[in-house]
């Protein structure tokens, strides 16, 4: 099954058939919403609204662990994530799509690991995006007629406020390309859970560093958002059309195979059970 994480507008994607809500209980609490399972472009798909129906959850309020755990328990092994971002580069303009390949996590204290509570583990995250899945996303964006940039660094901030001008100017010296508030956390948890993960970052505006920022109106941003939602639906269709029915062998799936360093006899039973769905036996 392929997981799709995005905004509620994707519920209405044309051709998403046999839709059924699948409430899932997780050891980490409820996900943002019950995943909606169905079929799209011949693939079994599970869709999850990141911020819940009606966009009611702040980035810092999202139960990321429950979201990834719920998708893994439904059989998801590949996740296509769609997210609105601000641009930190002149070349990445509103309306463009960026298939990012790196993250800089600048969040402050949100839960971003399944480990803990008696089980210590460390997964490698040098390359946090699945290259095979990202290639499919980029091909799908090309086929949909989008202006797409392959590669880029996504700076993940806590929010919910946007950056100050001083912050924005400093972030640009770090060499990041886009800025958002959610996807680094998803990528970390997906890697721990052995799920291939890729992000389609939809540029809605320039961050406040841009000299024309003050000329951007709310109406302009909303128009770009709506246009991006329509385009992202087409990209998902084209991406699913080029992905194989069976996920090919991938290192993402075995990333946690040797991650646990706690001696087995010291792992509490409740920790073992809590992590069974994401780590297996």
Image: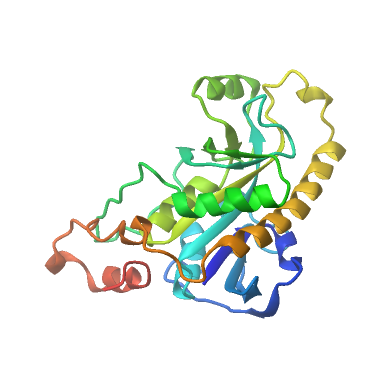
Residue at x 78% of width, y 21% of height: 212
Residue at x 84% of width, y 43% of height: 223
73 and 272: which one is in front? Answer: 73
What is the tally of numbered marks visible in this picture? 0
Residue 49 shows up from this direction: no
Q: Is residue 24 above or below residue 243?
A: below
Residue 205 shows up from this direction: yes
Residue at x 62% of width, y 74% of height: 42
Q: In this view, does 203 lie above or below 51?
A: above
* Colouring rule applied to residues: rainbow
122 relative to 162 in the view: left or right: left
Q: Position of residue 257 (x, y in %)?
A: 25, 61
* Quadrant in the picture for residue 265: bottom left
Quadrant position of the C terminus in the picture:
bottom left
* Quadrant in the picture for residue 37: bottom right
Residue at x 74% of width, y 65% of height: 13
* Quadrant in the picture for residue 35: bottom right
Q: Where is residue 17 in the image (x, y as percent from the top left)?
A: 70, 78
């Amino acid at each position: 099954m392929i997981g799709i994480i995005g905004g509620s507008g994707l519920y209405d994607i044309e051709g998403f058939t046999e839709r059924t809500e699948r409430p899932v209980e997780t050891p980490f609490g409820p996900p943002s919403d019950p995943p909606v399972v169905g079929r799209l472009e011949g693939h079994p798909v599970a869709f999850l609204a990141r911020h819940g129906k009606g966009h009611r959850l702040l980035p810092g309020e999202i139960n990321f662990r429950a979201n990834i755990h719920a998708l893994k328990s439904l059989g998801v092994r590949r996740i296509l994530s769609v997210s609105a971002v601000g641009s930190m580069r002149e070349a990445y303009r509103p309306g463009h799509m960026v298939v990012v390949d790196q993250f800089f996590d600048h969040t402050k204290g949100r839960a971003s690991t399944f480990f803990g509570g008696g089980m210590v583990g460390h997964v490698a995250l040098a390359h946090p995006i699945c290259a095979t899945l990202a290639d499919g996303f980029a091909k799908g964006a090309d086929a949909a007629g989008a202006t797409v940039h392959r590669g880029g660094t996504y700076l993940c901030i806590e929010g919910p406020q946007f950056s100050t001008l001083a912050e924005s100017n400093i972030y640009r010296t770090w060499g990041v390309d886009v800025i958002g508030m959610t996807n680094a956390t998803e990528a970390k948890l997906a890697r721990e859970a052995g799920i291939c993960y890729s992000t389609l970052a939809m540029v809605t505006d320039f961050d406040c560093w841009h000299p024309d920022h003050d000329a951007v109106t709310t109406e302009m941003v909303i128009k770009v958002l709506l246009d991006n939602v329509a385009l992202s639906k087409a990209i998902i269709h084209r991406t699913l059309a080029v992905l194989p029915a069976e996920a090919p062998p991938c290192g993402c799936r075995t990333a946690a195979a040797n991650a646990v360093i706690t001696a087995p006899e010291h792992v509490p039973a409740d920790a073992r059970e809590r992590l069974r769905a994401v780590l297996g036996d």
